[in-house]
């Protein structure tokens, strides 16, 4: 406590005593016990008030010795499993070095893909991310004198490249374990291809072959689909030309999930052959859509529709009559009803009963009176003369992308339809324009049913638009793409599924094998109380297993990390409901940790140099300990802490003041004193 504070307290004491004596004893000869008590209470009250004003404090300074923090950051991935004895020996030497204990607080962390504190190592992590733990430790010890000793083989396979770490405020020491000998090696890079391919089409496949070595080699690259070789090429690589791109098109001949294997032949001196092979999958689907054009008249529009729709090989168009056999209708996925009349009556009944998606095209031969009665979605006014109508894109249409469809400059269509009134929800794709004025009446509209989709196009001579597209661009793609999108939209099913799955067809290693599902009740609200069971069958050996899916935050999940590599089929069913879905996936025997054969000691050394540290090997553990123990940067520092505390608790003192003045007032009143 400062001297001036002590003097102020003494002065407050004198003032409080003086006030009490002056009030009760000055010119007052009565000095009985009552007056002494009253004077004491007055002293307490006045002294307490003065003490609050002074607010005396005292400070205490403590001195501590703060050691630097040495973080031992150890690689716990499978790639350093062979160096387990070296790592344990290094850690034991560091933990038992007295010179380090005197200088450092030693913390242990392990890392694979993530950072975690540990006192034991398993060397089982499937991925290595060096950048992330280094950044996390730099942030955690930003305000302390610290350093990191990174013990690893230097091979990172996920995350940002640690060679470009930006925070160099903390030195990083590196100790490289593993085989540092440079071997010749050929490896296959990631495979880029489509997730899906259409039957009888070709799909692209791209990858690359990398060579690591100082010589010149020749190897054969092959691509297999199942057991069939579909591509092979002999390539030559050297130190200066160490990368070769592989690009090819592969035929999708049969439906199903296809496993593609890209491999390179082993070269004579190669030690690591695991990375000579890489797998992926492509699901070949038969999305052949049968489109039936039903018409009683011959018109160029029919040929234009057929050519445009069949520009996609997955669609087949054939012509029907309103009285065609029902078997023909059963094979039709989408109907285009061209200028329907009363003869279409049975077809409209079929479409309504089977909820078949369709597009109605009206023209001068259309029986509007029949059409208005045959369906309950719209009503078209009759009695209008045939006239030229122009189409105008609706910029607010969002059911599918039409931004690349250019309609300006297109010739008019012919229509005798009046304004159309809808009785159900609809979306306008094209508006009608007559003599340069938008009459706010749709030309082309689409509607969603419960599980089917419908369209109404008011106008014929649509063939002119396809011809104009060719005149403008030299091909038909503008119109054909637009009509293809319309047909694809109509072929979609608007019915919502209560059970939805999300998974990959290929899992590279079982650690990433996760299948998720969402299940909705009849009101299409997520149901967290359902029981979803998944049955998994290994197609290679026919072994099956059944398990329940775990409920997570808004979805169900099946963790399949315990499965061995292979080809699997699965089925997910909802207990108590007749709802299930099937799927298929492949777990490849792929391990990123096995893609490297040698330690990357050069990059480890570059990291140490860029951050102000040094690089070592297990055989140099004594030199490492000596450098850490003698470097001036890590000398323990004395730290002082000054703790300032108030001498009195103001709440207690305030209570004493109130109590003293209250008792004084009560005693004066009780004894009749003024």
Image (cartoon, rainbow, N blue to C red):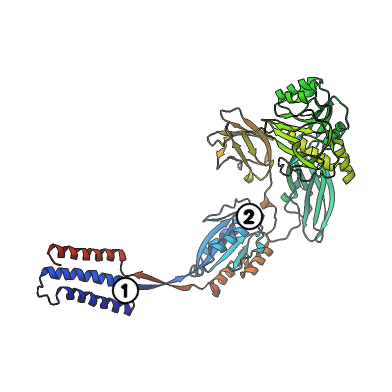
Q: Which mark is residue 197?
A: none
Query: Which residue matches tag 1?
Result: 54
Which residue is at a point 60% across and 27% down the rendered structure image?
578
Q: Secondary structure at mark 1?
A: helix
Which residue is at a point 68% across and 63% down the rendered structure image?
603
Relative vertical location of residue 206 with respect to residue 171 in this rendering, above or below: above
On-image quarter of the C terminus = bottom left
Q: Residues within 10 Å of mark 1 (few under 14, many from 20)?
A: some
Q: Please indicate whether residue 18 sits to the left or right of residue 289 in the image.
A: left
Relative vertical location of residue 21 with respect to residue 227 in this rendering, above or below: below
Q: Is residue 567 among the parts visible in the rendering?
A: no
Q: Secondary structure at mark 2?
A: loop
Which residue is at a point 55% across and 35% down the rendered structure image?
527
Query: Which residue matches tag 2?
Result: 128
Q: Position of residue 440 (x, y in %)?
A: 74, 39
Q: Position of residue 130 (x, y in %)?
A: 62, 59
Q: Residues within 10 Å of mark 2 (few under 14, many from 20)?
A: many
Q: Position of residue 523 (x, y in %)?
A: 57, 33
Q: Position of residue 195 (x, y in %)?
A: 73, 42
The Cα atoms of the two marked residues, 1 and 2, are separated by: 63 Å
Q: Do the residues under discs 1 and 2 have CB atoms within 8 angstroms?
A: no
Judge by depth and name the residue closer to the eye, 427 or 450.
Answer: 427
On-image quarter of the N terminus = bottom left
Q: Nearer the viewer, mark 1 or mark 2?
A: 1
Q: Earlier in the sequence, mark 1 or mark 2?
A: 1
Q: Please indicate whether residue 176 sits to the left or right of residue 337 in the image.
A: left
Q: How many marks?
A: 2
Residue 281 falls in image quadrant = top right
């Amino acid at each position: 406590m400062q001297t001036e504070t002590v003097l102020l307290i003494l002065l407050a004491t004198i003032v409080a005593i003086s006030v009490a004596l002056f009030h009760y004893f000055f010119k007052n000869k009565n000095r009985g016990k009552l007056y002494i008590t009253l004077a004491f209470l007055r002293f307490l009250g006045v002294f307490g008030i003065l003490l609050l004003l002074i607010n005396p404090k005292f400070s205490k300074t403590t001195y501590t010795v703060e050691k630097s923090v040495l973080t031992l950051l150890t690689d716990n991935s499978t790639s350093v499993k062979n160096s387990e004895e070296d790592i344990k020996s290094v850690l034991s030497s560091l933990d038992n070095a007295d010179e380090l204990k005197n200088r450092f607080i030693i913390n242990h962390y392990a890392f694979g893909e993530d950072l975690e504190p540990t006192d034991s190592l398993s060397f089982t992590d499937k991925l290595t991310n060096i950048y992330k733990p280094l950044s996390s430790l730099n942030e955690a010890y930003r305000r302390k004198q610290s350093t990191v000793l990174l013990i690893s083989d230097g091979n990172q396979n996920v995350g940002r490249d640690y060679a470009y770490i930006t925070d160099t405020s903390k030195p990083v020491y590196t100790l490289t374990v593993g085989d540092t000998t440079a071997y010749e090696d050929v490896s296959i890079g990631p495979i880029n291809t489509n997730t899906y391919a259409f039957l009888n089409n070709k799909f692209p496949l791209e990858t690359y072959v990398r060579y690591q070595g100082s010589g010149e080699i020749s190897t054969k690259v092959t691509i297999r689909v199942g057991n069939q070789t579909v591509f092979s090429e002999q390539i030559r690589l050297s130190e200066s030309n160490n990368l070769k791109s592989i690009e090819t098109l592969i035929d999708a001949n049969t439906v199903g999930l296809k496993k593609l294997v890209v491999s390179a032949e082993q070269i004579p001196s190669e030690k690591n052959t695991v990375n000579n092979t890489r797998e992926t999958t492509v699901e070949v689907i038969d999305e052949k859509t049968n489109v039936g054009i039903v018409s009683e008249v011959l018109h160029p529009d029919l040929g234009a529709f057929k050519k445009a729709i069949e520009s996609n090989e997955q669609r087949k168009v054939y012509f029907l009559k309103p009285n065609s056999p029902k078997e023909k209708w059963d094979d039709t996925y989408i109907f285009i009803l061209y200028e329907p009349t009363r003869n279409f009556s049975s077809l409209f009944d079929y479409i309504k009963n089977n909820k078949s998606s369709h597009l109605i095209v009206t023209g001068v031969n259309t029986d509007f009176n029949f059409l208005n009665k045959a369906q309950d979605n719209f009503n078209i006014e009759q009695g209008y003369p045939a006239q030229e109508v122009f189409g105008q894109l609706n910029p607010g249409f969002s059911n599918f992308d039409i931004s690349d469809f250019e309609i300006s400059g297109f010739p008019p269509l012919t229509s005798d339809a009046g304004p159309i009134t809808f009785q159900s929800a609809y979306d306008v794709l094209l508006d009608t324009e007559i003599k340069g004025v938008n009459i706010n009446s749709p030309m082309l509209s689409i509607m969603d049913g419960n599980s089917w989709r419908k369209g109404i196009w008011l106008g014929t001579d649509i063939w002119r638009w396809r011809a104009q597209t060719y005149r403008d661009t030299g091909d038909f793609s503008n119109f054909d793409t637009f009509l293809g999108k319309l047909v694809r939209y109509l072929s979609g099913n608007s019915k919502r599924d209560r059970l939805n799955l999300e998974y990959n067809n290929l899992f590279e290693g079982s650690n990433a094998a996760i299948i998720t599902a969402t299940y909705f009740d009849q009101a299409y609200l997520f149901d967290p109380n359902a029981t979803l069971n998944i049955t998994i069958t290994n197609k290679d050996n026919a072994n099956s297993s059944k398990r329940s899916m775990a409920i997570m935050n808004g979805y169900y999940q099946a963790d399949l990390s315990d499965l061995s590599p292979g080809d699997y089929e699965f089925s997910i069913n909802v207990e108590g409901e007749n709802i299930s879905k099937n799927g298929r996936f492949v777990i490849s025997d792929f391990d990123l940790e096995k893609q490297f054969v040698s330690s990357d000691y050069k990059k480890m050394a570059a990291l140490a140099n860029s951050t102000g540290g040094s690089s070592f090997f297990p055989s140099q553990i004594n030199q490492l300990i000596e450098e850490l123990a003698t470097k001036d940067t890590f000398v323990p520092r004395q730290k002082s802490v000054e703790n300032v505390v108030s001498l009195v608790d103001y709440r207690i003192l305030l209570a004493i003041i109130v109590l003293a003045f209250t008792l004084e007032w009560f005693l004066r009143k009780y004894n009749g004193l003024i």
